[in-house]
Image (cartoon, rainbow, N blue to C red):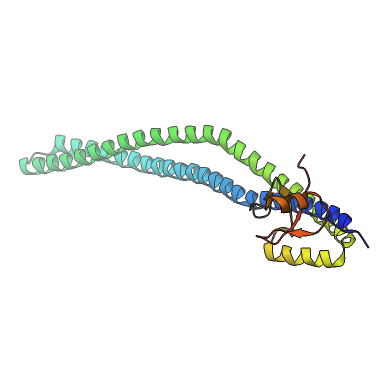
């Protein structure tokens, strides 16, 4: 059966493992939200590019339609001009003039819309150029970061399993009553049943330990608990 001093040395090993495990879990918890944020940024870029391309395709389709309209209107005007040269009746002549004015008005409207389409198309193509430059740089950085985080998550998860296995190998060496006490406190606290004393501060709850009690804890000669959080107090230097 281990001595109290031996139990405390095992507990020091345990709390070191617990702190490493806590940091690994903290890192693992932070990775998924960042990956999700990266995915959102990439998706936003892709959607912006797709939407701009869709608008350009729509403008190009409308441009082709207007070009056909203008071709039709110009053909109609040529036909009306021919009718104008042949007509002898003033009333019919004025009707043709009215029709030509109406067609010319539609031509003006179509040409005005065509200019607007060309202007907007130029703006949208500039957007495509800017987005392409942005995506070739920023998107690549984001994808690389995501790959790195995924690798880091895998490596951290592997090291976490190793730490937990190492901890399980230490626990059986601790006296049964101390092991049960540790397990009970750990279950209640959620991280560790042991806390290091740095100076006179419990590193489990960061409360101050009375000076005389702190001196006794630093000797690592008896099992002592934090009066505030209940964790078993040990002392070791942080290298």
Of the pair 155 and 127, the residue shown nearer to us: 155
Residue 236 left/right relative to 208: right
Estimate the x, y position of residue 169 in percent, counting from the top left: 88, 58
Residue 4 left/right relative to 109: right
Q: Residue furthest right?
A: 1
Q: Residue furthest left?
A: 90
Residue 132 left/right relative to 122: right
Residue at point 83% right, 67% down? 177
Residue at point 47% right, 36% down? 128
Based on the displayed image, in which of its 4 quarters is residue 224 positioned? bottom right
Residue at point 69% right, 66% down? 188
Estimate the x, y position of residue 119 in percent, counting from the top left: 34, 33
Vertical arrangement, residue 88 with respect to residue 197, above or below: above
Of the pair 221 and 154, the residue shown nearer to us: 221
Q: Can see residue 34?
A: yes
Estimate the x, y position of residue 131 in percent, counting from the top left: 49, 36
Q: Residue furthest front?
A: 212
Q: Can see residue 157?
A: no
């Amino acid at each position: 059966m281990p001595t109290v001093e031996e139990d405390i040395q095992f507990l020091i090993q345990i709390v070191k493992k617990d702190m490493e495990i806590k940091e690994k879990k903290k890192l693992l918890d932070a990775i998924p939200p960042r990956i999700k944020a990266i995915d959102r940024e990439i998706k936003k870029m892709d959607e912006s590019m797709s939407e701009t391309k869709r608008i350009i395709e729509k403008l190009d389709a409308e441009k082709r339609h207007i070009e056909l309209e203008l071709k039709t209107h110009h053909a109609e005007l040529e036909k009306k001009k021919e009718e104008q040269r042949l007509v002898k009746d003033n009333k019919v002549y004025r009707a043709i003039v009215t029709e030509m004015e109406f067609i010319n008005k539609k031509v003006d409207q179509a040409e005005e819309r065509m200019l607007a389409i060309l202007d907007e198309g130029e703006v949208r193509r500039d957007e495509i150029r800017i987005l392409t430059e942005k995506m070739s740089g920023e998107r690549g950085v984001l994808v690389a970061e995501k790959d790195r985080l995924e690798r880091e998550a895998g490596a951290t998860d592997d090291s976490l399993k190793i730490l937990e296995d190492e901890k399980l190998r230490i626990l059986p060496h601790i006296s049964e009553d101390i092991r049960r006490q540790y397990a009970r406190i750990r279950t209640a606290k959620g991280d560790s049943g042991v806390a290091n004393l740095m100076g006179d501060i419990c590193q489990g709850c960061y409360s101050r330990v009375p000076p005389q009690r702190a001196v006794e804890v630093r000797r690592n000669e008896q099992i002592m608990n934090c009066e505030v959080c209940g964790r078993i107090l040990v002392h070791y230097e942080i290298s």
